[in-house]
Image (cartoon, rainbow, N blue to C red):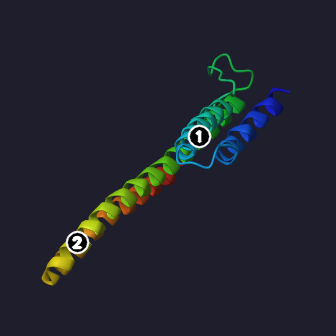
């Protein structure tokens, strides 16, 4: 029963931002309200998934009914945490890359429009921003290599 309620809340959090956006008056203020609801629903989904993932039972090795099943549960929990860490590393690095590349590319285009000889230096600076995503990918591969 609780699982059905939790999935209903998850569906509500996913649909609610669209409903707020389309139900509001056709003026500029509805974008801010829809964004606020979207952020609240995002963090609601984040909390829901965190509770749902980590809601398992934990036993100490001496108190476990079956030591082999306790070890398997600990291994599965460690694997899940490693996958979560690898996904977070990759996601956050690509977000940082997008922000850095957007600002560096805009500045590089402005500099190139004033002085064309600076194009090589500008491309190097923009490509350095792309390195952030590559480093994040390497770190996530290192995390997944230990699983």
Q: Is residue 26 above or below residue 37?
A: below
Q: Is residue 124 left or right of residue 91?
A: left
> Is the residue marked by circle 1 packed among few (<14), some (14-19), or many (20+) residues within 10 Å?
some
Which residue is pictured at 16% across the width and 83% down the height? 116
Report, in whole angstroms, how far the alpha carbon at label 2 lies from the one at label 1.
36 Å
Q: Kindly identify the residue that appears in the image at 70 percent across and 32 percent down.
A: 68
- Where residue 125 appears, as percent x and y from the top left, is 23, 68
The residue positioned 20% from the left and 78% from the top of the image is 112
- Residue at position x 66%, y 42% in the image: 20
Q: Tell me the number on the disc at residue 42.
A: 1
Q: Is residue 52 above or below residue 123?
A: above
Q: In the rendered image, is residue 128 in sight?
A: no
Q: Quadrant of the N terminus?
A: top right
**Callout 2 touching callout 1 (CB < 8 Å):** no
In the rendered image, which quarter is residue 99 located in? Answer: bottom left
Q: Callout 1: helix, strand or loop?
A: helix
Q: Vertical placement of 109 versus 129: above or below? A: below
| Label 2: element kind | helix
| Position in image of residue 140 (x %, y %) | 46, 54
In this rendered view, identify the residue nearer to me: 24 or 89: 24
Residue 121 visible? The answer is yes
Q: Can you give x and y, in whole percent of width and height, for residue 34 in the image?
A: 59, 43
Say whether disc 2 or disc 1 marks the residue closer to the N-terminus.
1
Q: Quadrant of residue 122?
A: bottom left
Q: Which residue is mark 2?
A: 110
Is residue 142 toward the left or the right of residue 107 in the image? Answer: right
Q: Position of residue 75 (x, y in %)?
A: 61, 38
Residue 112 marker: none
């Amino acid at each position: 029963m609780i699982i059905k309620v939790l999935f209903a809340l998850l569906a509500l959090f996913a649909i609610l931002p669209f409903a707020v956006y389309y139900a509001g008056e056709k003026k500029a203020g509805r974008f801010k309200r829809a964004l606020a609801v979207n952020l609240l629903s995002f963090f609601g989904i984040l909390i829901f998934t965190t509770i749902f993932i980590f809601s398992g039972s934990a036993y100490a090795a001496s108190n476990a009914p079956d030591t082999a099943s306790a070890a398997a549960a600990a291994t599965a929990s460690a694997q899940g945490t490693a996958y979560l860490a690898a996904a977070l590393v990759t996601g956050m690095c690509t977000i940082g890359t997008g922000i850095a590349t957007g600002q560096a590319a805009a500045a590089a285009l402005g500099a190139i429009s004033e002085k064309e000889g600076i194009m090589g230096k500008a491309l190097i600076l923009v490509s350095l921003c792309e390195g952030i995503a590559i480093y994040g990918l390497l770190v996530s591969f290192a995390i997944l290599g230990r699983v």
